[in-house]
């Protein structure tokens, strides 16, 4: 277990979820720089808000300040909880908030890790702005290569004049002085696009995968989905804005469809997408989960109970390439599929999902391919019949 040594103390931290890239550390130089800065601010009395604390490094170190921690990732919430427990810190000292939860009315300190997408940052800053007052201390941190002029411009426009620090271990801080007077800000709108044929409306909150237009891989997946299948149970795993699950729901009006994603905004987007296209929603569920592992006790997702699982797995964890989530999704799907149930997967050609699916399912068919993408289908084979010794006597 790696030790995280910062002015606030020495802590044991790990990436805990099986879908997090195992070789990535649970913190980066930007966390260290931010905590160094926090220690120089002295006594942090008042409401502290952390944003995008990937594995809880900030929450663990600053737990005595009883922070709230806002983020869009359920996997990050699981990692934060595990790291608090690992360091024997009372879980109630940190309030975990998903993207759509209300923020504290007044924030005195905001420590922000710059996220991967500018749209998510914009949405978070717009949500934060009403809680900021003229003496709120706002410090953001990120790796130098992820902080651009456009990042600074966003802080300037929404929160106030911003300057950057010198780089330290390739990380940089952004110091923001809140605007003196209140400025009128419009919350970021939900984006929307329409699919032809069918006039399907797809809705997405900011930062959700391919929120402005249909991704070309998803489009190829949709072109290769199976024909109608009747009264069945389907999972859209890593649903994003829910477009795949919605197309399946429209093609299979008697099916139960579960939309699952680790992003709070993705799950909320999938729900909006379904509501915009279908009047009756009782056979749909919208669940935040870390693949299917964290939903083991959910009644609709028992082992050997699902007919079809569809996924377009992510191949990045934070900024690093990783196949950890794909592996976890394939083995979770194998567990929840009933005998002869099928997992349908789309991936870029270079990702070699074929080999993984063969290892887990013992089979894998290619349903369609083009120069960039391949659609695979793996079938859960019936478990071999267990014979008792006296069956042969
Ligand atoms: C490539 S996108 C696909 C989105 C959508 N299915 C589509 O094709 O437009 C992958 C999705 O997987 C989600 N995801 C990443 N890690 C996950 C995890 N551990 N559990 C569930 N979903 C996850 C991401 O938030 C993202 O929405």
Image (tube, rainbow, N blue to C red):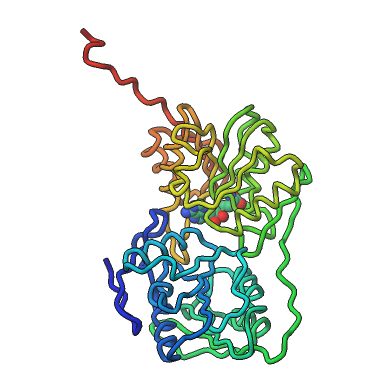
Q: Quadrant of residue 27?
A: bottom left
Image quadrant in which the N terminus is located: bottom left
Looking at the image, residue 281 lies above or below residue 121: above
Q: Is residue 137 visible?
A: yes
Left or right of 272, for residue 99: left
Left or right of 210, for residue 51: left
Q: Quadrant of residue 63?
A: bottom left
Q: From the top left corner, tell me how far across and down residue 297 is, in percent.
A: 46, 42
Q: From the top left corner, tell me how far across and down residue 253 is, in percent.
A: 69, 33
Q: In which quarter of the image is residue 180?
A: bottom right
Q: From the top left corner, tell me how far across and down residue 324 is, in percent.
A: 40, 53
Closest to the observer, 317 or 385: 385
Residue at far right of view: 199
Closest to the observer, 185 or 114: 185
Looking at the image, residue 237 lies above or below residue 358: below
Looking at the image, residue 207 lies above or below residue 289: below
Q: From the top left corner, tell me how far across and down residue 355 is, in percent.
A: 39, 42
Residue at figure coordinates x 63%, y 69% from the top left: 119
Residue at figure coordinates x 54%, y 69% from the top left: 70
């Amino acid at each position: 277990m790696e030790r995280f040594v910062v002015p606030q103390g020495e802590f044991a931290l790990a990436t805990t979820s099986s879908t997090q890239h195992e070789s990535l550390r649970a913190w980066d130089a930007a966390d260290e720089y931010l905590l160094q800065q926090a220690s120089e601010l002295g006594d942090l009395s008042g409401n502290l808000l952390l944003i995008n604390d990937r594995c809880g490094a900030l929450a663990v170190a600053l737990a005595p300040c009883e922070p709230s921690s806002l983020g869009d990732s359920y996997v990050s919430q699981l990692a934060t909880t595990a790291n608090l427990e690992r360091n024997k810190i009372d879980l109630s000292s940190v309030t975990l908030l998903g993207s759509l939860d209300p923020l504290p009315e007044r924030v005195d300190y905001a420590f922000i890790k710059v996220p991967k997408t500018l749209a998510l940052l914009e949405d978070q800053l717009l949500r934060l702005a009403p809680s900021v007052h003229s003496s709120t201390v706002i410090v953001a941190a990120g790796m130098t290569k992820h902080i651009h002029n456009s990042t600074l411009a966003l802080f300037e426009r929404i929160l106030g004049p911003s300057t950057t620090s010198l780089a330290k271990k390739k990380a940089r801080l952004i110091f923001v002085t809140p605007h003196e007077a209140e400025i009128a800000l419009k919350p970021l709108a939900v984006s929307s696009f329409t699919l032809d044929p069918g006039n399907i409306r797809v809705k997405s909150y900011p930062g959700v995968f391919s929120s402005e237009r249909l991704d070309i891989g998803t489009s190829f997946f949709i072109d290769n989905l199976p024909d109608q299948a009747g009264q069945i149970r389907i999972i859209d795993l890593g649903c994003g804005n829910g477009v795949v699950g919605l197309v399946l729901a429209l093609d299979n009006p008697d099916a139960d469809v579960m939309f699952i994603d680790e992003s709070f905004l993705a799950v909320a987007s999938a729900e909006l997408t379904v509501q915009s296209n279908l009047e009756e929603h009782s056979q749909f569920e919208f669940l935040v989960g870390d693949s299917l592992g964290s939903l083991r006790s959910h009644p609709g997702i028992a082992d050997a109970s699902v007919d079809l699982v569809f996924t377009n797995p992510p191949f990045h964890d934070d900024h690093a390439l990783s196949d950890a989530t794909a592996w976890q999704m394939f083995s979770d799907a194998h567990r929840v599929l009933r005998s002869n149930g099928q997992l349908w997967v789309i991936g870029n050609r270079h990702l070699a999902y074929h080999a993984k699916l063969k290892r887990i399912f013992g089979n894998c068919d290619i349903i369609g391919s083009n120069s960039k993408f391949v659609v695979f289908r793996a079938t859960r084979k019936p478990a071999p019949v267990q014979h008792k010794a006296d069956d042969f006597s």
